[in-house]
Image: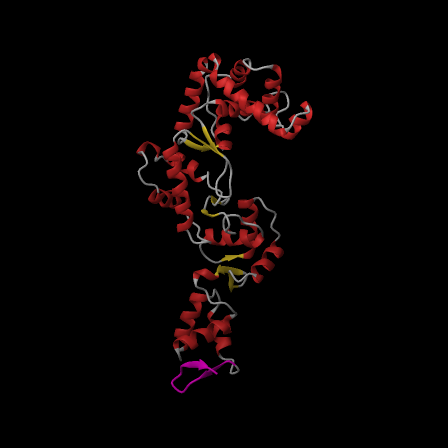
Amino acid sequence: MAEKIVITFKPKQVTKRLLGVLSPRSQDVINGRYGLGAETKKMTLEAIGQKYKITRERVRQIENYSIANIRKSKEYEHEQPVFDELKALIQSLGSIVSEEDLLKHISKDKSTQNHVNFLLVVGEEFHKEKEDDEFKHRWYVDRDLSKKIHESLKKLYSSMSDDEIMSESDMIDSFLEHLKDVSEEYKKEEVIKRWLSLSKSVGKNPLGEWGKMSSSNIKAKGMRDYAFLVIRRHGSPIHFREVAKLISELFNKKAHVATTHNELIKDPRFVLVGRGLYALSEWGYAAGVVKDVIKAILVKNGPLTKEKIIEKVLKERYVKENTIMVNLQNPKFFKKMKDGKYAVA
């Protein structure tokens, strides 16, 4: 959550003084375009054009002329301390910051945010890059630094595998590896995280783990994805009842025990390793029931003693030794050799 920053000026009073240099119609056009009046919703060029029975292109001209006239006015010169304060604020946030993050830092009030946004548009030292496929709407005051941040975020994304998950500290370290020739004053955790949040390609899941936004590990879509994150975080085999409970606690999603169990059964990412106990297949657990595990061990290692088989199966499954012996003594699947070792039948 963005921490509110106290500004020394009143944005609505500043915009009122700046708009005072314009004709009533120009003021009305600007108020509509930027949501500066009682209605905070911004009007389209078409809507304003219909209101005045002029083309959208004419509305755009009026908007551009109005901003140019404000910039040439004595009132604009008089308000320079306000623009200096806004510039210092953006610099303190990292010199490039997402529009949403910046406005939330200043005020939660939509109307006030609209007035600040207008001041950013009018201020000649502020530059906006519009949202695209890779990045959110963002404002910057340092062109060279902005370019470096964009390039570093692209390199960071390219360096990550599709389903990679990393801790926040690892993500920050990884980003810093791609970030060259940037002043040490910016290399603070809160600034780095703010820069990372500019990207629409990387992000974090509700557990605070980072990765590609296209990955189900980051943008979890259903019970199976939530279960995967829960079990991975737990770090060892866990009962499906506990998985359902943790999904409810960590993701605030209603997880029925039976539904959770069904989803775990269907997904190859999970392996049943004991009675109701599930592990991740990426941890190296073999798939299948106990007899399948014994068979896989014997195929890989050749004939083994029962002690060795029990030892290897217990690394794969949370079962009683007796369960392993019962399976091993099934002549349909396994045979005991003259030397006492067991092999696949």
Above or below residue 319? Residue 52 is above
Query: Residue visible at 53% across and 17% down?
Result: 15
Above or below residue 291? Residue 63 is above
Residue toward you, 42 or 207: 42
Above or below residue 180? Residue 100 is above
Task: Tally the numbered discs.
Answer: 0
Residue toward you, 275 or 134: 134
Q: What colouring style does the render use?
A: secondary structure
Above or below residue 72? Residue 42 is below
Question: In the image, 18: left or right of 175?
Answer: right
Query: Residue visible at 51% across and 54% down?
Result: 228
Percent position of residue 168, x then y: 41, 43
Q: Quadrant of residue 63?
A: top right
Q: Is residue 68 magenta?
A: no
Q: Seen from this angle, which residue lies furthest bottom?
A: 338
Percent position of residue 115, x then y: 54, 22
Q: Is residue 339 magenta?
A: yes
Percent position of residue 69, x then y: 51, 18
The region drawn magenta spans 333-345
Is residue 167 something one can see in this rendering?
A: no
Question: In the image, 53: left or right of 114?
Answer: right
